Amino acid sequence: MKLTNMEERIHILHGQSTTWSVIKDIVSSNNQEDAFYVCDVGDIIRKHKIWKAMLPRVEPFYAVKCNDNLVVLEVLNALGTGFDCASKAEINKVMGLGVSSDRIIFANPAKPASHLRHAAEMGVGLMTFDSDTELHKIKKLYPDARLVIRIRSDAVDVQCQLGNKFGCDANLEAPSLLALAAHLDLEVVGVSFHVGSGCREPAAFNRAIRAAKGVFEQAQRLGYNLSLLDIGGGYPGGKAESIQQMAEEINCALDEYFPETNIRIIAEPGRFFVGSAYTLTCNIYSIRNVVQTDSEGNIVDTHRMYYINDGVYGSFNCILYDHQVVEPKPLEQAPDAVYRPSSVWGPTCDGLDQVVDNVMLPEMKVGDWLVFEDMGAYTLPVASPFNGFPVPKVQLMFDEDVWSFLKDVLNLTEDHFEMLKVPSDLHLTKEVDSGFQLPDFPIKMEIPCR
Ligand code: PLP
């Protein structure tokens, strides 16, 4: 195993250790000054167990765009999930791990021609579409592809809307697109939707599954016998969040509209698998006290501005692009700490670089640390080193039994600790035996799924 300088970035949990105790060890032992992530690999495995228990009919195809860290992809590969890829580079990345083409869905409805040609070369035949332009392109470049029509069915309460960009109208547009596909002699195999990322309205899945059923019936009238339903992403992934209610809606809707067991049901969860696995810890490197006055100019309070070493151009891009609300938690806190109105700022020279605008925090000093939980989704793949501030590195944390199972699968190198490294060319490196048996992992799940 090529661990040389990396041992100090792998933490094997013993006894009572937790993410927070690992973070405290890191900041106290290593002259640590840079911001860093801790990735709890066991959390990803627990999520997989929860998914299997709560959504037994639904095969997860992990949405690579959400977090394409090698460890995440390799662990999910070892667990036997499929993958939702949006581009040629994502296809290369997962196939480079030994994932076979039949475990991939190319779920970007609008595909650049070169990416489509590449999918054809690699045999990644399952793909979504939502327009006549794409059907003509597919006819020309990959006529044997197996097509999934993406319909629009939006949740009302959602963190990020996607229906404004993708998904045809199930009643007004799907019939003519299916007719065109039939005319072009293309193989349509299923229907997909995405209710929106960070869905807060479980009933949205019922509506969308019902709409998909309508499209199955339209397709049948045209002579298609559809066999795949793709229920997209949208599942919450935070520590305090559960998919239970959503799973109940989905399971009920599947029982009602798709009772046939020969229909394959897949989903494209991203946030669910990685959100809570990653915790970011940032260092306070400067502080400014700003006097606040009332309308008559009397001093009423002092607002504390904390400057930390990661911001909206780095990990906290999720505030701008993913509409996340992040919560700073002091790593250490004196019992008698005085709370002050505070704001938290990133390290660049841009006034936009604000992480939290107004929050009550205990008075902190330069060198103290702020912890941000639930930072695994839509953070690292987008982060940039703007103004020369590096993107935080990842440290890995494993429960002891998970580590003993995974260490040979992972064969760790520097790349496992870095942000996005997308290969432009594919080098098949190794074969991974998928679906391996994990130790019986305790998960908290009070209510069993139907
Ligand atoms: N599938 C597609 C096509 C997407 O565009 C996305 C997110 O943008 C996902 C899946 C993942 O969604 P989520 O992270 O909400 O599960």
Image (tube, rainbow, N blue to C red):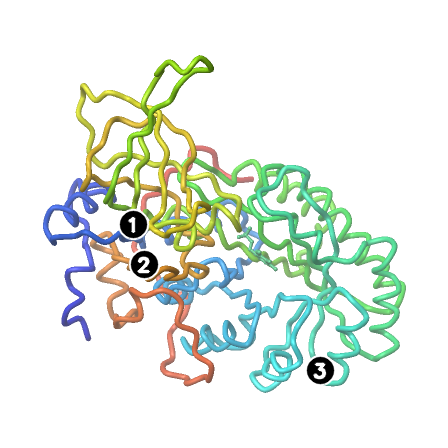
* Residue type at the position of mark 1: Asn
Mark 1 secondary-structure assignment: loop
In which of the image's four quarters is ligand 1 placed? bottom right
**How many other residues sit within 10 Å of disc 3, few (<14), some (14-19) or many (≥20)?**
some
CA gap, disc 1 and disc 3: 50 Å
Image position, residue 170 (x, y; %): 81, 54
Please state, as top left, top right, bottom left or bottom right, where the C terminus lies in the image: top right
Left/right of residue 220 with respect to residue 378 in the rendered view: right
Q: CA distance from mark 3 to mark 2?
A: 46 Å
Q: Which numbered disc, 1 or 3, marks the residue closer to the eye?
A: 1
* Lateral position of residue 108 relative to residue 66, left or right: right
Q: Nearer the viewer, residue 65 or 399?
A: 65
Q: Residue at x 76, y 70 (%)?
A: 188
- Please give the label number shown on residue 421: none
Residue at 79 percent across and 58 percent down: it is 216
In this rendering, position of residue 180 left or right of residue 405: right
Mark 2 vs 1: CB contact within 8 A: yes
Name the residue tied to disc 2: 389
Choose the circle earlier in sequence order: 1 or 3: 3
